[in-house]
Image: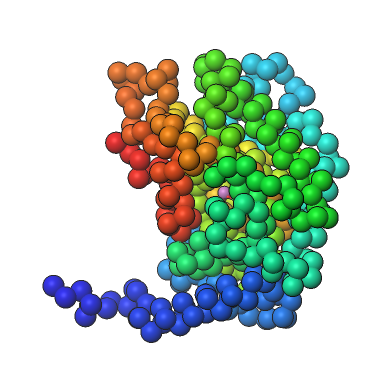
Amino acid sequence: MNTQVINNGSSPSPTTNNDRMNDLKAFDEGKTGVKGLVDEGIQTIPSIFIRSLKDRSKDLSTCHDNISVPVIDFDHGSENEIAQEIVKASKKWGFFQVINHGIPLELLEEMIEVNKMFHEQDSEAKKKFYTRDYFNKKVGFLSNHDLYQSNAANWRDTFYVNTMLGDFDPQELPLISKEVIMKYIEHMLKFGEQILMFLSMGLGLKSEYLGKLECSKGWSLASHYYPPCPEPELTLGNSGHTDSSFITILLQDQIGGLQVLHQNQWVNIKPIKGAFIINVGDALQMVTNDLLKSVNHRVIAKKIGPRNSIAFFFHGLIPSEKKYAPIKELTSEQNPPIYKDFTICELLTQLSSKAVDELGTGYFKL
Ligand code: OGA
Ligand code: NI
């Protein structure tokens, strides 16, 4: 059958596609991201950001404030109790918030401030960081890493540091924010190890088990800036997706907008001053054979803003030949492995070739 002649109206015609491609390129080549559009004073959003009616109508109703992800206080309970709480939350929600983690509040505030400064600096200076090659260029700035794969672009720009191909050179960091970012990274690496220890304990593994998987060797930091949006109901700040990482540690400011899919409803993750949001990624779901859940989440666009958030992903190294598989101690005859072996490279090839909303663990199912 000649499928070219079939057009049921659900896919855009080739002409629209060409138009869209030209618009995407023009936006990309402008190198000033969404913030650049807002600075121009636009009152309506360009079509590349508009989600299809079908996608918008699929939106599930949002369950506002009556339920929320667990908040875990590191100042309360024994290590074992904290470990149990973390694993319980990771099974039920795939997300939790941590308070009293010991990382200085001033550093969190400085990091948000530094993010704002980067995105709000003179656009000519910012353009020098702009790139699409976010694996090879280890420090950079871009808008929408899946710009050419997604159906609709997101209302968001991102400054990033990516060490998944190996170490980065701190000299590449923006001069004014170098010290703060370096200090933040140092704390994140320690905090991540601590979370991996709690997760190991709570899963009944040796406390160093997950840390030894080398997931903290290749990490990335995505420092997001979500400008105010004139037509927030037509787009998203970050499309629904799961993270491909083992774990992600996220810092958000007080604007709000992050939602997690729980029992088929989008639930707001309320900003708590000084808290970190932690979530399980696809890699951890797979090595725990689905015991822990990598859960869909998204960020809605808002009229108010900007919103700042800093995501820190523990991924593992792409060049590593290490094969990951469901952990033997967590599988049995009654509960056999449901995933095949994978390397970090295989996992991340998915990330760079697909739109974020098409990712997930499905590809690796046995
Ligand atoms: C991400 C993410 C959420 C946020 O970067 O993967 O989900 O609040 N970010 O920015
Ligand atoms: Ni995410």
Name the image quarter holding residue 36: bottom right
Residue located 51% across and 55% down the image: 240
User: Which quadrant would the N terminus be assigned to in this image?
Assistant: bottom left
Image position, residue 202 (x, y; %): 56, 20
With respect to residue 36, does 176 lie above or below?
above
Q: How is the image coloured?
A: rainbow
Residue located 46% across and 55% down the image: 352
With respect to residue 223, does 22 lie above or below?
below
Name the image quarter holding residue 314: top right
* Residue closest to the eye, 303 or 292: 292
Name the image quarter holding residue 279: top right
Image position, residue 336 (x, y; %): 32, 24
Image position, residue 47 (x, y; %): 53, 78
Residue located 52% across and 27% down the image: 213
User: Which quadrant would the C terminus be assigned to in this image?
Assistant: top left
Judged from this view, the residue extending furthest toward the left is 1
Residue located 30% across and 18% down the image: 333
Going by the image, does 106 lie left or right of 313?
right
Can residue 257 be seen? no
Image position, residue 60 (x, y; %): 49, 57
